Image (cartoon, helix red, strand yellow):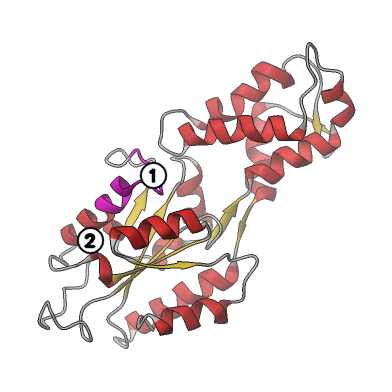
């Protein structure tokens, strides 16, 4: 059940209800499809070079991957279609292997989940700490997620790492592939949907400035700031948790 909004004056910035909203990929959990394709290319470089009429470089494959994800993240294509373009152009024409095993669609999907979807425990640790304080009524903070993610990978991450036990207000979880979103960051529409969801959760007086948004991509952070939110660029793999905590403290969210 959602917590009720603070009874303080809507104009009292020091006591207003505040929200910390996390990006998923790069902050909490990595879905590193770029590294997956790089690994496949590295292990099959000779085979790729034999491909006719033109041999692709790893940059060509990553550009194709980027194009596919732009559709996948908004729910326009399925995971089978996301990977399927590589089978249509490459894997169906010659034998390609990943760790010595022939690449099939089922094997690629399975191995991607095992090897290339990984948690960033420092980012998750902050969410866990806030959740523990919520249980003890030691904080008025609410936490949520705003992510460019797919309909298949997002629920997999939630289930595998039990994110629903940390992010306990479902309306504060906004995914780019949700039926009522179908739009990714940095476009403002996904931020508008986050605001709508927060208000539906009972926090009717929320303003963008009540939200601190954490993302690993500066363009997304800049867009959030332009929308009126507070923004922090932080990468769960490359930066220490203390850096994130210090930034949140500077902004008055911790």
Residue 105: numbered disc: none
Q: How many marks?
A: 2
Q: Of residues 119 and 14, which is closer to you in this image?
A: 14
Q: Is residue 84 above or below residue 216?
A: above
Residue, disc 2: 198
What is the crowding at mark 1: few (fewer than 14 residues within 10 Å), some, or many (at least 20)?
A: many
What is the crowding at mark 2: few (fewer than 14 residues within 10 Å), some, or many (at least 20)?
A: many
Determine if the magenta segment contains residue 121.
no
- Look at the image and tell me in which quarter the C terminus lies: bottom left
**Mark before the other along the chain sequence, 2 or 1:** 1
Image-based side of 209 in relation to 62, left or right: left
Q: Is residue 32 above or below residue 212?
A: above
Q: Secondary structure at mark 2?
A: helix
Q: Is residue 130 above or below residue 185?
A: below
Q: Of residues 20 and 210, which is closer to you in this image?
A: 210
Q: Residue at left 41%, top 34%?
A: 75
Which residue of the protein is positioned furthest toward the top in this rendering? 53
Q: Of residues 8 and 105, which is closer to you in this image?
A: 8
Q: Residue at left 72%, top 35%?
A: 59
Residue 176: numbered disc: 1
Q: Quadrant of residue 38?
A: top right
């Amino acid at each position: 059940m959602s917590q009720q909004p603070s009874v303080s004056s809507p104009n009292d910035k020091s006591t207003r209800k505040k929200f910390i909203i996390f990006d998923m990929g790069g902050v909490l959990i990595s879905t590193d499809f770029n590294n997956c394709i790089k690994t496949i290319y590295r292990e099959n470089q000779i085979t790729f070079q034999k491909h006719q009429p033109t041999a692709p470089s790893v940059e060509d494959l990553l550009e194709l991957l980027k194009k596919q994800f732009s559709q996948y993240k908004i729910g326009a294509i399925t995971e089978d279609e996301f990977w399927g373009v590589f089978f249509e152009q490459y894997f169906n024409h010659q034998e390609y292997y990943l760790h010595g095993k022939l690449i099939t669609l089922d094997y690629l999907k399975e191995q991607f989940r095992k090897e290339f979807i990984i948690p960033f425990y420092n980012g998750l640790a902050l969410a866990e700490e806030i959740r523990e304080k919520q249980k003890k009524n030691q904080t008025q903070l609410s936490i949520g997620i705003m992510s460019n993610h797919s309909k298949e990978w997002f629920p997999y991450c939630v289930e595998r790492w039990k994110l629903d036990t940390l992010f306990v207000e479902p309306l504060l979880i906004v995914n780019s592939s949700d039926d009522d979103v179908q739009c990714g960051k940095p476009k403002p529409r996904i931020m508008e949907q986050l605001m709508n969801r927060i208000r539906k959760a009972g926090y009717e007086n929320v303003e963008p400035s009540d939200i601190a948004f954490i993302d690993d991509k500066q363009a997304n952070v800049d867009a959030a700031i332009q929308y009126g939110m507070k923004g922090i660029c932080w990468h769960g793999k490359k930066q220490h948790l203390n850096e994130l905590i210090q930034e949140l403290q500077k902004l008055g969210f911790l």
